[in-house]
Image (tube, rainbow, N blue to C red):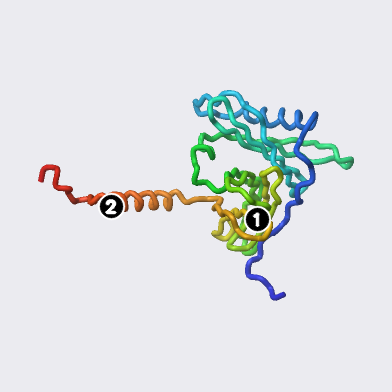
Amino acid sequence: MPPTDRFVIRFAAEPPRQPEPYGRWADTLTAHFLGACHSLDTEGEDLGEAGAIAWFPDRAYGGRTYVPAVARTTTGYELFGFVSFTETVTGEPTEYQSRADFTSETADSNPDWKLDLNDEVVGSWRGEHDSVADITLIWGVPMVGGGSIVTAELADLAVDQCALVEERFTLLSADNYRGDYLDIKLWDGNGSELASEPLWVDDDDEDESDDSAQAADDESDGVSDGESDGDGPN
């Protein structure tokens, strides 16, 4: 195989190893996750009380295991974050860390979403010519059926993948490297692409798209900037 000009870390995270947390283990993770939620700066918002926590497949990288989580609140917000830990030589979890955030943007209010994604940068990786990638934890659920596996692609190069576990997935891969950003793709069992979402959307591109859509609507109504429909004063 010839040398590649796309020298970037790939498939560095361990695949999921543990089943969905239950019992005392679930209680431990819950305490750490809710602790992070209670420490949030709510920016004056009433987040309400957290409901049932959905746990996502664990992924390990650099000696630390990450277990993402999502919970809805009684006031309609979504709490999202993760609990991470290292392990002793006997395999006992230790050195817990947790992060959490909240959002009012949920899949319920965005029916056009194909994938409901959350992400958090957890580290960095230095590549060629001092280029640095963000090691990013991504977790979510597909909003279309029939999926089997989810991949993360950087400049059309697959850098991680995760099979769906109870319709949930977790990715841990390089992002924001040499001006390229991740695309998250859902595939069925036959290798056919079912959905694709960019992890990042440029706000300027989004604004331009909205402006173009509005201009098209105005034109279809026979009215555009600087023109009159004939009903108003000249």
Which image quarter: residue 9?
A: bottom right
Identify the residue at image location x=75%, y=44%: 64
- Viewer-proximal residue, 198 or 96? 198
Q: As drawn, is 171 to the left or to the right of 176?
A: right
Judge left or right: residue 49 versus residue 45: right
Instruction: Check disc 1 and report its element: helix, strand or loop.
Output: loop
Q: Which residue is mark 1?
A: 188
Q: Residue at x 72, y 75 (%)?
A: 1
Number of numbered labels in the structure image: 2
Query: Residue at 43% across / 53% down in the picture?
Result: 205
Q: Position of residue 203 (x, y in %)?
A: 44, 48
Q: Residues within 10 Å of mark 2 (few under 14, many from 20)?
A: few
The image shows residue 77 at horizontal and vertical percentages of 54, 31
Which of the labelled discs sits on residue 220, or is there none? 2
Q: Residue at x 72, y 28 (%)?
A: 31
* Residue 105 in the image: above or below residue 121: above
Mark closer to the chain start, 1 or 2: 1
Q: Amino acid at mark 1?
A: Asp
Residue 120 position within the rendered picture, expressed as x and y whole percent measured from the top left: 62, 44
Q: Say above or below: 167 vs 29.
A: below
Q: Which mark is residue 150?
A: none
**Identity of the amino acid at label 2?**
Ser
* CB contact under 8 Å: marks 1 and 2: no
Q: Secondary structure at mark 2?
A: helix
Asked whether 8 or 185 is in front, the reply is 185
Q: Nearer the viewer, residue 6 or 209?
A: 209
